[in-house]
Amino acid sequence: MFSIRKIGVIGRTYRHLNRYSQILAVFLKYGFEDLIDQLKIDQYIEAALEMISKKKRAVRVEKMTRAERVRMAIEELGPTYIKLGQILSTRSDLIPTDFIQELYQLQDRVRPSPFYEIKKILETEFYSRVEDVFDFFDETPIASASIGQVYKACLKDGETVAVKVQRPGIRKIIEVDLEIMLHLATLMEKNIDEIAIHSPVKIIEEFARLLEKEIDYTVEATNMERFARQFLEDSTVYIPKPFRDATTERVLTMEFVEGIKISDITRLQAAGLDRKQINLRGANFFLKQVFDHGFFHADPHPGNIYVLPDNVICLFDFGMVGSVDQHTRENFVDLLDSVVHQNEMKATQMLLKLTTWDDEPDLRLLERQVSEFMGNHLFKPLKDIKIGKLMQDMLELASCHGLRLPPDIFLMMKAFGTIEGISLLLDPDFNMAVQVAPFIKRVKIARFSPQRITDDMTELLWELLQFVQQFPKDTLEITRLIRQKKLSVKLEHQGLENVLATHEHISSKISFSIIIAALIIGSAMIVIAKVPPLFFGISLVGIILFSAAAIMGIWLLAAIFKKGGL
């Protein structure tokens, strides 16, 4: 896991001062002075203004929308921010639609690092010279992205391979950027109420976890092998194989595969390939990932999907994947099924089952809006129903009620939209809703298969057995802790405040009455005893005490009458 901590102490502040100032300079350049003011980071402003003053603002921000300025600022800030923007483009619960459209355009257009730096990484990772590992290595990259770049090479056994190498120092760059992001997110949560409701600190922490997986190429190699096993019997799909002996955390060596990008319609037609068959196979490939295996490619954009001879689908770049367990898949299917059958009550229940929230939503209002959502999408010809749009609107509906879906569900919905877009490019008459229907039906039927029922009963019995075995042990452990005085129980009464207050008032009045009675009795004894000094033959002390008792008695009666007593 990346070592990200909140910046607060002087040492860490100075350590990040230069990068922090660069980030703020970009914010200022693109006209985000209002955001900087709200964040209250005055200690960095002066350095940022110095940076931006060295070069004139070349951007006429007044002619751009705020969404365009955000996208351009992210592109200028570099790899970490580009990755964050790409992920946020899937979060329509957090980001307005116009921002989603801009962020979706973010691409890893990065100038490649010089080969001598790449060569150092290769030799460090392999503990050998490049010539000892590869028979041939083309020094010109065939692709260059923000985290790594890809080269064509040939292993000693003659196998042609693609070698993906991480950029030098990229982990350190990302780590520093993540620390600054976490600090900014903390300030946003503290100072900007509109952003605080989306828990920006949690978003950055989740982003760090996603990036950690993507930056470790051994994880990507494992993902490739898992996909290959899942589709081993499917001749319509091809997954390049990784070469483990030439793969490390920073270098991924995989089979080199030549094909045609799925969005290159001209070349597909020139090669005599069948667009409709390609489309059908590609859609089925993705739907099998989601509904059959629960493990899917989370970034299936056209640059990652190629077509091989005989209309075979080939997938690349397995750094970003998603995973949904069986119960989540079934809940998701129930949600789609209830929407299709226009059962707003069940749809609302399933939406709540899939989401988390801080404040419980208004169920009646949610049901009414779910019903309106169904009316907007379902009272139209089947060919006009777009699954991607339906899911996008569903996310916006959930967001309006403060409902949050798990990250992998978001990735899955985003992938659905991307695949549907590619499908319509290949075949304008394609209908994703029709294609999804058999998979939904299969998931529903699978619940009642003898094997599934047996598995569920076995699991239930196993959990019951575990409880029966564990409960006595837990009880003995609690008893032992109590004996050793390591466990204490604190009981707190709720709702007794009024009773206790009344009891206190009664006790005070009784005590007051006893004092008055004591004064009267004492005064009488002093008068009878004629304790000097005397006034007209009566003890002056007794008279004073009688007077005090009378005043206190009148005060007590007034208090009782005031409270409605007697």
Image: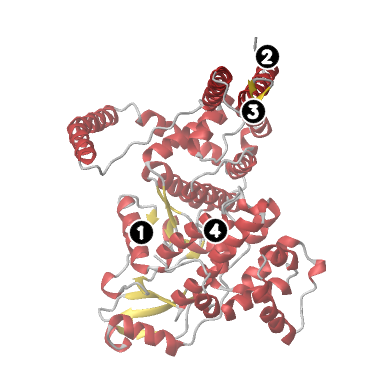
Structural crowding at the residue carrying mark 2, measured as other residues with C-alpha within 10 Å and reported as few (<14), some (14–19) or many (≥20): few
Q: Which residue is mark 4?
A: 87
Vertically, is 195 above or below 53? above
Query: Secondary structure beneath disc 1?
Result: helix
Left or right of 459, for residue 544 = right
Query: Secondary structure beneath disc 2?
Result: loop
Res 23 visible: yes
Quadrant of the rendering where the C terminus is positioned: top right
Query: Secondary structure beneath disc 3?
Result: helix
Structural crowding at the residue carrying mark 3, measured as other residues with C-alpha within 10 Å and reported as few (<14), some (14–19) or many (≥20): some
Which numbered disc, 4 or 2, marks the residue that appears first in the sequence? 4
Q: Which residue is mark 2?
A: 564
Q: Nearer the viewer, residue 117 or 143?
A: 117
Q: Which residue is mark 1?
A: 223
Disc 4 and disc 1: Cα gap in Å? 19 Å
State which quadrant residue 549 falls in: top right
Quadrant of the rendering where the N terminus is positioned: bottom left
Q: Residue at x 23, y 32 (%)?
A: 467
Q: Which residue is mark 3?
A: 371
Structural crowding at the residue carrying mark 4, measured as other residues with C-alpha within 10 Å and reported as few (<14), some (14–19) or many (≥20): some
- Nearer to us: label 4 or label 1: 4
